[in-house]
Amino acid sequence: MTKRILLSFAALCLASAVSAQYAWQEGADPGKWQPGKDIHYKVEMQGSMSSGKTPLWLNANKYGLSSLEENNGYLRMQAIRPLSTDSARRWALGYGLDLVAPVHYTSHVVVQQAFAELRWLHGTLTVGAKEWPMELKNNALSSGSQALGINARPVPQVRLALPQYWTLPFANRWLHLKGHIAYGRLTDQNWQHDFTQKQSKYADDVLLHTKAGYLMIGNPDRFCPWSLELGLEMATIFGGTAYRPDGNGKMSPVHNGSGLKDYLKAFVPGDADTPELGSDYQNAEGDILGAWVARFNYEADSWKLGVYADKYFEDHSSMLQLDYDGYGTGDEWNVKKRHHFFLYDFKDWLLGVELNLRNGTWLKDIVVEYLYTKYQSGPLYHDHTAGRPEHISGKDDYYNHYIFPGWQHWGQAMGNPLYRSPIYNTDGTLTFQNTRFTAFHLGFDGQPTDVLSYRVLASWQEGLGTYEHPYTKKHHNASFMIEARYALPRQWNVKAAYGMDFGHILGHNRGAQITISKSGIFNL
C-alpha cells in the first residue's frame, strides 16, 4: 500500500508543470496596446532621528537609499510601468523614473531608478538603473545576500535576463532555469573623491559585470510539495583608472583595460591585473567575487519551509575549494611537476531557515540565519615562491581589493551589510575593516489585522577585523529594529520604526524613523 502511494505521488510530480507566468501563455486577449496604461506612482516622505549614527537596520538593505547622519530624510517620487501590464502580449514594455530629494545624504539629488525594458516571450532586456531583489531569500527579513545584495544603490547597466523560471523542454518538466548577464558602470567616483580627499585608494570610471544562473528541480506550483534551487552568482569590478598611494605622498594611477577584450575577461575570468602583467604572479583581471547559493523548499497546506545556503568566494581557492600544489623546487619553482592539490576547509557560509505560516496573523514569517566568514581560505601566504613551493592561496580578504575600492557603491556594501561598510570609516579609507566574523540573525513579521502589520530584525555579531588589520581583541555588536505599518484609506500608509546598535563594531546608536506614503495607478 505504501509503495503504491509513493508511486502515485511520484507520477503526480512528474506530470505536473509550473503554472503559466504570463497571460499570453493561456491565450488571453491582449486588446489594444496602450503604452501609457497602468503607471504605478508613489510619493513618499521619510525622516530619521538618531543619537549617534542611524542604526543598522534603519539604513541597511534599502538599495542605498539611506544615511548615517543623526538627522536625515527625503522626499521621493516614482512612476513605474511594470512589464506585467503587458502580460497578455508576447512582448511587453516597461519603464520607470524614481527621483529623490534627500536631506543630509551623500548626494543632493538621487536618481534612484531610471530605466526602460522590453520583454519578448520569457526574455527581458533592461537599460538603466533599477532595483533588483535578492534571489532565494526573504528580502524583508534576511540579513542579505553575500554577493548580489540589496544594500547599495542600483548601478546603471544593460541587463539581459530570464527573470522567471523557464521550464526546460526535456526531463518531463522537472528542470527550470533563470538568470541574467549585465554590464554597467559605477556612479560614485565624485563621492569617492570627497570621502578619501584623494589621499587613499579610489577609482574612476569603474565598470561592473554581474551574472547569475539558477536551476530549479521539482514542480512546487502543482502537486509536488518540494523543490530544490541551485545557483551561481558572480560579479567583476574592472576597467577605469584606480589610484593608490605611492609612498611619497602622491597617488599613483593604475590604468585598467576597458576594451572588448576586458569585457570578455570579466565574463570569463582570466589574464591579469595591470600591475601583474609580465610578472610571475598573475591573478585574473579585476575584482572577482561570487557565491554558490542553494535552497530547499517544502510546501504543506498550512505552512511552507525553506532551508538555504550562501557560500561566498573571492577567488578560485574559495570558489572550487581546491588549489594546485605540485610545483617543483630550485629553478623549477614555478613549473608544474606533479599531480597534487590542496583541499580547503568547507567554511564561510551563510545558512538560513525560513518558515511561513500561511494562516498566521500575529506571527507569519520567521527567518533565522547564521554567518561565518573567518576562514577566507586560511591565514597563510597567498602565492608560492622560489623558497616556498607550497601554493596555498589564503588571506582572501573578502570585499576588499588591492586596486579597486572593493565590493561597495557609494560607501555601502553591495552584498551583506554585516560586513562593516566603508561609509562607517572615519579615516577616509574605502576599505572593509571587519570582514572576519560570526553572526546570528533573526527576522520575523506578522499582520494582526487587515490594516496593521509589523516586522522585527535582530542581529548579533562577533568580529575579528581582517587578516591584514586584525582587531587587538574580539569586537561585538548587536543591532535591533521593530517596525509597524498602518494602512489608511485611499492607499495612504504610515510606517514607524525604532532601532538600536550596541557594541564596538558600529558603536552605540539608537534612533526612530517615520515614513508616510501615497500610492496608486494612473493612465496617460
Image (cartoon, rainbow, N blue to C red):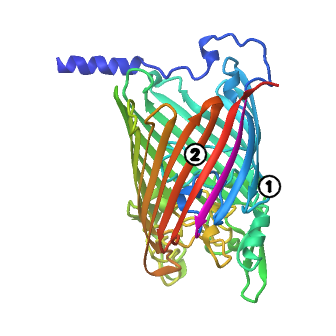
Q: Residue furthest left?
A: 1
Q: Is residue 139 above or below residue 492?
A: below
Task: Check if residue 50 falls in the magenta segment.
Answer: yes
| Amino acid type indicated by mark 1 | Val
User: Nearer the N terminus, badge 1 or badge 2?
Assistant: 1
| Magenta-tinted stretch | 39-52
Q: Can you see residue 416? A: no
Write down the residue under mark 1: 109
Q: Quadrant of residue 134?
A: top right
Q: Quadrant of residue 342?
A: bottom left
Q: Which SS class for mark 1?
A: loop
Query: How far apart are the alpha carbons under marks 1 and 2?
Result: 23 Å
- Considering the whole magenta stretch, tell me its main secondary structure: strand
Q: Quadrant of residue 165?
A: top right
Cβ–Cβ under 8 Å for marks 1 and 2: no
Residue ID at (56%, 49%): 496
The quarter of the image holding the N terminus is top left
Neighbour tally class for label 1: few under 14, some 14-19, many 20 plus, Cα within 10 Å: few
Neighbour tally class for label 2: few under 14, some 14-19, many 20 plus, Cα within 10 Å: some
Frontmost residue, 212 versus 224: 224
Q: Is residue 3 above or below residue 348?
A: above
Q: From the viewer's perspective, is 230 left or right of 164?
A: left
Q: From the viewer's perspective, is 265 left or right of 309?
A: right
Which disc, if any, is residue 178? none
Residue ID at (67%, 65%): 272
The quarter of the image holding the C terminus is top right
